[in-house]
Image: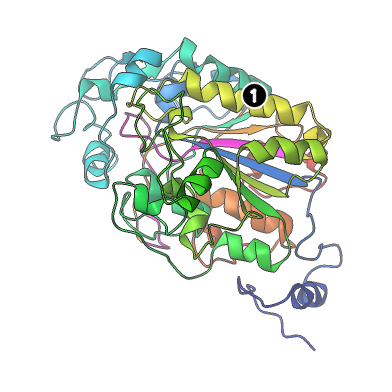
Amino acid sequence: MVACPTRPHALFSAVVFLTVLSASCGSSDSPAPGTWNSEIKHLVVIVQENHSFDNYYGSYCKASSGTNPSCNEGPNCCEGVPALDPNDVAPTLLDDGSNASYDPDHTQVCEAAEINAGLMNGFTMGPPCADVRNFAVAETAAKPYWDLAHGGALADRYFQPVVGQSSANDMYFATTKFVFLDNAYVPDFVVSRCTPNPNVMDFTGPNLGDLLTTAGVPWTVYAEGLAEARTAVAAGECPAPDPACPLALPIYPCVFDGSDIPYAYFGADSADTEHFADFSRMSIDIDTGTLPDYSFVKFYGFRTEHPGYGTTITDGTDPVTALIDRIQASPYATDTLILITWDESGGYFDHVAPPPTSSVDNEPYGARVPMLAIGPFAKKDWISHVTMEHSSIVKFIEWNWFGGETGQLGGRDATVNNIGSLLDSTVTGRTVPE
């Protein structure tokens, strides 16, 4: 007889054992790990960079700042940006030009001072990194994302999981816990030796990639520029900058950057073409019916809307909307959930205080970032007020592909909310927990 643990370990050695365990311990209608727990058979996660909720949706949302609306239907049910920040500073306009010309300081020490224990009063005055340009709100530049919110569901209480820069926050997509500070390390993957950061590191421990692989769930990271990077490294060179990149230098944001791929930090082999593919292969996989169950999409840095470097917002919204259109025009349209979020807030002002410090890893939450659910499973023109973060997406993956057994990574996936508040239970087939 199989003993029934309260939480299965993330790295069971065989799919057969997982199946037996599920049959012995789960409810009679719980699917075996590696199968679907709902009608959602494909998940595509697109991660853009460095914008707060107020940055993009401060003008979209129409409820008065601080009113905390309880309704959910449309932009009247989320708080707009305040007319003035706590220092009586009015917002500047965030458009393609201002996005391209200014990159706020977004290190942990800076963001912590700006958040100031939830007072949110250090963005424009006070700390050395304060700047009036940190309070910036988009209007027409964000319209493609506003249109997606009208057609899908928008989370207005989705927070970056840790104060600080991108890589530290990206790691929650893989581990649901704190691994390192800011952008301290790069993975030993493809072109790590071509980056300005000399701190190359592999990590061990439970991670989502291993969990999926062990259970036989197909997954792939589709990263723009990866093919060029592999070719260059094979020739003993570093990749040349993409011709469309405004910075025109052979570094981020013009080339593939492994530090944006959290799964690459865990002993990934750069020859692994099953789990790490160039973005160009995603179109082939869509056309040939070989799209994996889980896709993690990362564009070139200059297509992620990362401020500075000459990067425009339009250079990010164009490929995002094109990919969504491609999926929705394919046979995958009926069974795919698309999630779009931003790795962190980039040092930009947001008026809503983060949740309390996580009890799992004792790391403080950062500011809000947008998160959108797109496709047939998403509620329409809906605003979710449920507190979520990157680990919530991992929790959903565990729920949907592992018989409802969440918390398998032993991190925040055991404590955070799931994403069910964004989804329509009449379409998902099962009610996804909130």
Residue 150, by quadrant, is: top right
Q: Quadrant of the N terminus?
A: bottom right
Crowd class of label 1 (few under 14; some 14 to 19; many from 20; radius 10 Å)? few
Left of 397 or right of it: where is 164? Answer: left
- Where is residue 61 shown, x and y percent of the image? 50, 19
User: What is the span of residues highlighted in magenta in the rendered image?
Assistant: 336-361
Residue 94 seen: no
Looking at the image, residue 303 sits to the left or right of residue 286; the answer is left
Return the x and y of residue 330 as percentages of the image width and height.
Answer: 80, 31
Please report the residue visible at 36 percent of the width from the left and 30 percent of the height from the top: 350
**Horizontal and vertical percent position of residue 407:** 58, 64
**Number of marks in the rendered image:** 1
Observer able to see residue 298: yes
Q: Position of residue 191 (x, y in %)?
A: 42, 50
In the image: residue 83, left or right of residue 325: left
Residue 53 is drawn in which quadrant? top left
The residue indicated by pointer 1 is: 322
